[in-house]
Amino acid sequence: MSVKRIVTAMMAGCAVVVMSAVPGLAAQTPHEQHVAADAAQPASGMAAKDKTMMAEREKMMADMKAADQRLDSLVARMNTASGTEKMAATATVVAEMVTQRRTMQEGMMKMEQGMMTHMMEHMQAGAGSMAMCPMMKQMGDMKH
């Protein structure tokens, strides 16, 4: 499964979770509504958060590309090795794959939490706010 599909599926899942939480927002007590209103950002604050999230995504993509290059290098070394050197190189490749998987999983969990929070902020800011979000626009541009 490609990274784009994973990210798209994760963001769509987050949207479903956030949208299912909307009825719960309406049932908040007045104190909770006041706290939620205080948490809402003005449009300029939302734009800054959008830019921050886009920068975080770009960093994640660059980190993934570097990790792929590191893994490609280790695999090339493994493929040219023989005997006990090949076993050691194979163990190094497996260890790198496990490390990268854990790192990616942690990043996805962090991104999921951030996206849910971000979408809730857009929903609180009004109907047009989410439509103007660069992250949402980019999701619409992704090819499946």
Image (tube, rainbow, N blue to C red):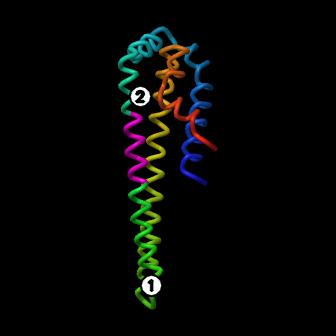
Q: Identify the image quadrant of the C terminus.
A: top right
Let me know if residue 51 is in the magenta part.
no
Place of residue 135 in the rendered image (x, y in percent of width and height, measured from the top left): 49, 32
Question: Where 106 falls versus 50 (above or below)?
Answer: below
> Which residue, given by chain and number where applicable, does mark 1 sit on?
86
Residue 34, position in %: x, y? 43, 10
Q: Nearer the viewer, residue 35 or 12?
A: 12
State the quadrant of the N terminus.
bottom right
Mark 2: give few (<14), some (14-19) or many (20+) Cα within 10 Å.
some
Q: Nearer the viewer, residue 88 or 17?
A: 88
Residue 59 in the magenta stretch? The answer is yes
Q: Residue at x 58, y 41 (%)?
A: 8
The kind of residue tagged 2 is Asp
Q: Is residue 81 above or below residue 104?
A: below
Query: Over which residues does the magenta segment extend?
Result: 53-64
| Residue 111, x across and y down, in percent | 46, 40
